[in-house]
Amino acid sequence: MKNILAVSLLFSTFLAFGQQKMADHYKIYNTATGKTVTIDDIVADMASANVLFFGEEHNDTTAHYMELTILKTLIAKYPARVALSMEMFETDTQPVVNEYLKGLIREKNFITDARAWPNYKDYRPLVELAKASNINLIAANAPARYTNMVTRMGLSGLDKLDATGKSHLPPLPIDTAAGKYYQKFETIMGGHSSMPGMQIYQSQNLWDATMAWSIAQYLKVHPGIKIFQMNGGFHSEEKLGAVAQLKKYSPGLRVLNIASLSGTDINQPDWSKYTNLADYIILTDFKAAN
């Protein structure tokens, strides 16, 4: 108990210091009203929601601070009713994640065996907060070897996996979302719709579907839990991608999403770009180093 209280105090001190330091570097807007809001407002909105998606830019340090602050606030507002879900860990590493959160293995082994991202330092505070707060962390993403397989062989390649391999994925076949999501993907790909491009799009759908399935299955076993899902922005913007896949697996869920964007004018949003992007947008003045 003393250790938990000490860690909690450490996070509270860190967040208080961070809030003073970061306050001038971001603004949060409710896109329905165009007005600025606070993290407390978003967390209060979760009273009637099941899942909060945070679409980040992976190198934005301000966004990582915001994620930590949101998770801390969710835990305080809904004690014993929060779980963290992350794109940054893959489904087959869930036993390793669980072992670390329970204090059974060293952090060194966790980082290696859970295949933590190269910038794990950016996500470590969230993992440590989950550990200290005794909340679950869902390793939500599809194993990279399978997304790579789809990029090379198409979704039909997954049929060749054995039962163990398939157990790390959603039920096959994966729904390849058409329409607006594909159009967005084509735009990013430069308008190329060749077969390799289509297979890359199929791997994107596998990525989305696995994260959605991971959340849906967790909520089936743990009803009433608030899920805080972290992923790259494209996966959840406009409630497409992983959000749309989640709605197929669990139609009754209420989902909120945040889009975090860096290098923008935080005081004068271009609403022509942001209105339909998310329920909330976080604009930061972070600019990646060249």
Image (cartoon, rainbow, N blue to C red):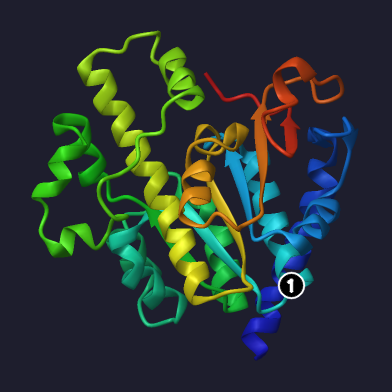
Relative to 257, 214 lies left or right: left
Give x and y (percent) for residue 186: 41, 16
Q: Residue at x 58, y 38 (%)?
A: 56
Q: Is residue 117 visible?
A: no
Position of 33 relative to 118 (above/below) = above
Image-quadrant location for residue 206? top left
Residue ID for mark 1 = 78
Q: Residue at x 55, y 67 (%)?
A: 128
In the rendered structure, which amino acid carries the disc numbered 1?
Tyr
Relative to 211, 201 lies left or right: left
Position of 271 relative to 42 (above/below) = above
Q: Quadrant of the N terminus?
A: bottom right
* Outermost bottom residue: 1
Q: Residue at x 62, y 45 (%)?
A: 54
Relative to 196, 206 lies left or right: right
Give x and y (percent) for residue 204: 36, 34
Give x and y (percent) for residue 60: 60, 35
- Looking at the rendered structure, the secondary structure element under dot 1 is loop
